[in-house]
Amino acid sequence: MFSKILVANRGEIAVRIMRTAREMGIGTVAVYSEVDRCALHTLTADEAFLLGDSDPSSSYLNMDKIIDVAKRSGAQAIHPGYGFLAENAAFARRVTAEGLVFIGPPAAVMANLGNKTVARTIMAQSNVPIIPGMTVSDTDPARLLQAAEEMGFPVLIKAAAGGGGKGMRIVHDRAAFAEAAELAKSESMSAFGDSSIYVEKCLDRPRHVEFQILADEHGNVVHLFERECSIQRRHQKIIEETPCPALDEELRGRMGAAAVAAARAAGYVNAGTVEFLVDGAGRFYFLEVNTRLQVEHPITEMVTGLDLVRHQIEIAAGKPLPFDQDRLTRRGHAIECRIYAEDPEADFMPSPGPILFVKSPEGPGVRFDHALYTGAQVPMQYDPILGKLVVWAEDRHAAIERMVRALKECVILGVKTPIELMIDVLRSEPFRTGDVHTRLIDDHFSSWQPDRALDHLAAMAFVANEILGPVPGTVSTPYSIGRGMRSPWQTLGAWDMTR
Amino acid sequence: MFSKILVANRGEIAVRIMRTAREMGIGTVAVYSEVDRCALHTLTADEAFLLGDSDPSSSYLNMDKIIDVAKRSGAQAIHPGYGFLAENAAFARRVTAEGLVFIGPPAAVMANLGNKTVARTIMAQSNVPIIPGMTVSDTDPARLLQAAEEMGFPVLIKAAAGGGGKGMRIVHDRAAFAEAAELAKSESMSAFGDSSIYVEKCLDRPRHVEFQILADEHGNVVHLFERECSIQRRHQKIIEETPCPALDEELRGRMGAAAVAAARAAGYVNAGTVEFLVDGAGRFYFLEVNTRLQVEHPITEMVTGLDLVRHQIEIAAGKPLPFDQDRLTRRGHAIECRIYAEDPEADFMPSPGPILFVKSPEGPGVRFDHALYTGAQVPMQYDPILGKLVVWAEDRHAAIERMVRALKECVILGVKTPIELMIDVLRSEPFRTGDVHTRLIDDHFSSWQPDRALDHLAAMAFVANEILGPVPGTVSTPYSIGRGMRSPWQTLGAWDMTR
Amino acid sequence: MRFRVKIDNQIFPIEACAADEHGYCRMAVNGMGTDAAVKAIAAGHLHLEANGEATNVFVARSGSGLWVWVDGRARLVFDADTEQRRRGTVRREGPREVTPPTPATVVRVPAIVGDHVEKGQALVVVSAMKMELTLTAPYSGTVSAVHTEVGAKVSPGEILVEIEADPEGETHG
Amino acid sequence: MRFRVKIDNQIFPIEACAADEHGYCRMAVNGMGTDAAVKAIAAGHLHLEANGEATNVFVARSGSGLWVWVDGRARLVFDADTEQRRRGTVRREGPREVTPPTPATVVRVPAIVGDHVEKGQALVVVSAMKMELTLTAPYSGTVSAVHTEVGAKVSPGEILVEIEADPEGETHG
């Protein structure tokens, strides 16, 4: 086993990985950018190294610097987390070439699956059902439009290199196609360094259901059941749950088998996720393989009782999986809410700034993976995820109620968050009945407004605070030492978005 | 289902019960004493009522006042937690007579099982093995001594009405018997209002293994597997785990069946615990039934995936158990450490006082049920439990490492706690190998001293704090408004105990 | 003591007393029939009882306002009188200027000086936090100046495109 | 700057610098070869790097001392110089008086005026937090006064039983 690993990431996922490493007796090395000198991941590691300025290309995307730190610190392996270099095959290749271990799949597998059209071809050859659409990417507007017209609108434009909704556009008619394709290409270029896109048939209100897989170097592959990830905004998941209310045991079994087949077809090793779309008739289609630990991995941990990061590290160290498919069981129901610094009243615009007060929810069945403390800064340079609130309970109904309770206990002041919206979504009829699909937020919450019923209580609390005086210890301004500047983001709430 | 319940308790257990009630859509009513005006349970409830001054007899033991609050607030049921009135049959009878529901077993069952000698008789009649000893309690020193001599020293003197180590004394020889019996009678009288005691054979370094049971009003009884509770100090559990490393499936099955038989023999309803002693040869003996929710119930919740408080409330509302024995499974390993305000260097003397700083441990597989906040007071009038730190993981080894990690993250300043001792116990050879018994702390840690290896770091932190100045928000003195006085307990660390 | 408290665009007139011997500050919202008693518990933590129900409220000062958390809902709360003085004559009628809502990088500039644009038409596309945002015309008119270019780093308040508004009533196809 | 810091009975002489531009305060323990850099992160939260390893340290002021949490270990830390001045000539030789360590209620009083008692013999039994504690004779001697009775509420510092010590060397069977 490794004695020291480097975590090439920041925020809640870096902290979460370090906790498991610590429990395994493995030393932890953090890397950080200028703006993250006091970030929680920097503070949590046994050792921390400055990469450079806050631009991702100078820090968390800078392969040379990260590999240099790994060598200087004596780390034997690198865990990439999610985002940044996690699905960068060139990085995985570099790490291996330098004699270090990449905690993730082999670079070649990652390259194949990272190209969405290559992945579609591999799956089609292994009889894993794929969504109707192109299997070769393109940049030429005319050929792309032609493909779109052949399959019929609406279509989805997707980045060949991408994932996570980056570079993705729904196009409902021919007129809007050209500008959407331009935008998708440009976003794809800035996110992945590659402007290749392709066109897929857009299914009507599909469910997004993914299967977690674990595969070792010895040919063992298992799936850890599904995650229902249909609740999205801006094509990014915000609420996930497992089990998926729409799957029966028969369909779950078939999809799990398809996920394992997909992993075997790709030669997969380590933890990964096979994403499917499921239509109203219960037909499922391969969407993509995420060759990393997913943001939403904790709900799988909750229902299976496994620590996925521990298994990632053990697999990377060459150990065989300690269980086979028959030994794995699901129990209860788990839900995750992603807590971003974003404004649900302004189309989920990021809302970075200082965390003026934070208090984690507690009690039975609650886990909050985060990188927050009172006085921490949420920088504008990176993905504005603050944390992931996860609950599990005996059944879906109890899990929903537990999540509502936990969200109400999840106090975050200083930046906008979707917590209030999430409470309303969880309590909504469509969510309660399990009738979820990828357009649920758009269909039911696009003009969501905060409930004003308790505003008079907030007003009275304001008055009490004026009368009772500043309570000892209230943080009025963030500490200035070694912190980034106060960004204009924090006033974002007062801006009307034009988009 | 009830629309409102009263929680007749304080501290972490009251907060824990309220969280589940809230998730079930049930309103919560707290009761509190003068010193608990700002206690977390008082603050957590939807409504809170002052009972009276801080003496338990004026507050948490005052049946009249508690029943009056239940009626005034419109609560339909009372959850007694553990301790205080939880095992008081007269209280359960009063609650029922007043038309309210007692969330616990019927009064008559509680009375039978509360009398340890009656309980021993019931079990013996149902072929549940009992420890050799008296089945009739007594107060006469001569007859007690005679019984002790007949079974041979060492013997245990126990309170007939008691539990939890109160009024219990080990006697190694005839000479010490008389004073020990007097002390036991006096302690039993003050704790339970009854000085009856009895004598039992003292087993050599037995394991204390208990089985959780759930029984509904419809004759269904299940067990939720065991808890190993051998790690004790002052005859009180401080570290519990499940599964018990010493049980194989065959013995677990026989003990589970005996626990269910014991529950059936007693006519048990609601959640309860059947305690056994297990000797080195794998023989097990009935010890007692705890007719309440146990402090250590969360480890069972972790490995079975059930919310015991939810099931207690549902059973009390007349619902049948939603599962039978075959549906129940164990998974992984859970450990609990009880965090008391007590000084492990001074024979675990209570150490009440102000909580000057608290920070809960977080991350995967960690749960901290507590009633703390920075600025809270730990009053001297009540049991000094601060919280219960619970972890679960895939196996015992991972659970131990996770608990060590969590203990290190469980920052509590202002009162003495056993956290440091617990880290050392968990890392000790006897605990690691699973070779635990009720004398482990006495045998290996009776002269425990803090490890001084990191004291120089604490010294440097002191200097930094002097130089960097008081960090904004540091609480230097607790807020004076509405708080109890600063008790001399907080200086206890400087006292040498004479006992 | 009397207060006028502002949340969003609503004003709450509140009459409050000094703290009592248990530290509770009692108050009522005029015209709403809601009484409350509020007590300070710890740093940023208040306990509020209103109409027989209690809840924990968390607060944090932010500039001239106070963030308040009630039951999962965060509000930025102001003293209405101070706020009014501070804002003075500032018009509050929605964005009239083409400026990014966040620090961002310009990726495309469809606006061309002299072009006529309709309200809502794309003028500048910026990228921030790996997302693209389109800044559109706040009203119909003619582009009179473009102050940015592809690759520029821009900040809120910086006017990227100026538009000379159409005369009232005039429309273009 | 020089400090003498006391934990338990150990004195640590420490030489420290003012904070650098990143807020780190650098220091060394004289004679131990341990360098550290410590930075203030948040209320009660410091970050400490020593010999290439970092850890989070939590602190809280308590009277003249500072509680410090390092890696699961809580220490009450004092400035040794202040502490010495404060303690002055106070004798530190263990309990010499029969007084409860905690507020408690007296449940039994075996001590009788005029009795001779051996060191360690039970004098008063008190009850606190549902536990019984036996207060024993701190030295051998003759009970000269009993200032309490069953049922009394007693506090630390209150002398419950006075004992006239035996002359040195004298023992009783």
Image: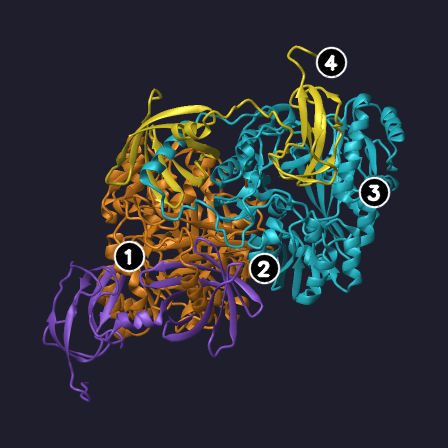
Chain colours: A orange, B cyan, C purple, D yellow
Q: Which residue is mark 4?
A: D172
What label does residue B45 carry, if any?
Answer: 2
Q: Residue A123 location, x and y as percent?
A: 40, 53
Q: Which residue is mark 1?
A: C129
User: Which of B251 and A284 lies nearest the eye of the viewer?
Assistant: B251
- Secondary element at image label 3: helix
Task: State whether residue A404 is above or below residue B404.
Answer: below
Q: Nearer the viewer, mark 1 or mark 3?
A: 3
> In whole angstroms, how far apart are the C-alphas of marks 1 and 3?
67 Å
- Is the Cβ of the residue at disc 1 closer than 8 Å to that at disc 3? no
Q: Which residue is mark 3?
A: B119
Looking at the rendered structure, the kind of residue marked 4 is His
Q: Nearer the viewer, mark 4 or mark 3?
A: 4
Looking at the rendered structure, the kind of residue marked 2 is Ala
Figure quadrant of residue B322? bottom right
Q: Nearer the viewer, mark 2 or mark 1?
A: 2
> In whole angstroms, how far apart are the C-alphas of marks 4 and 1?
85 Å
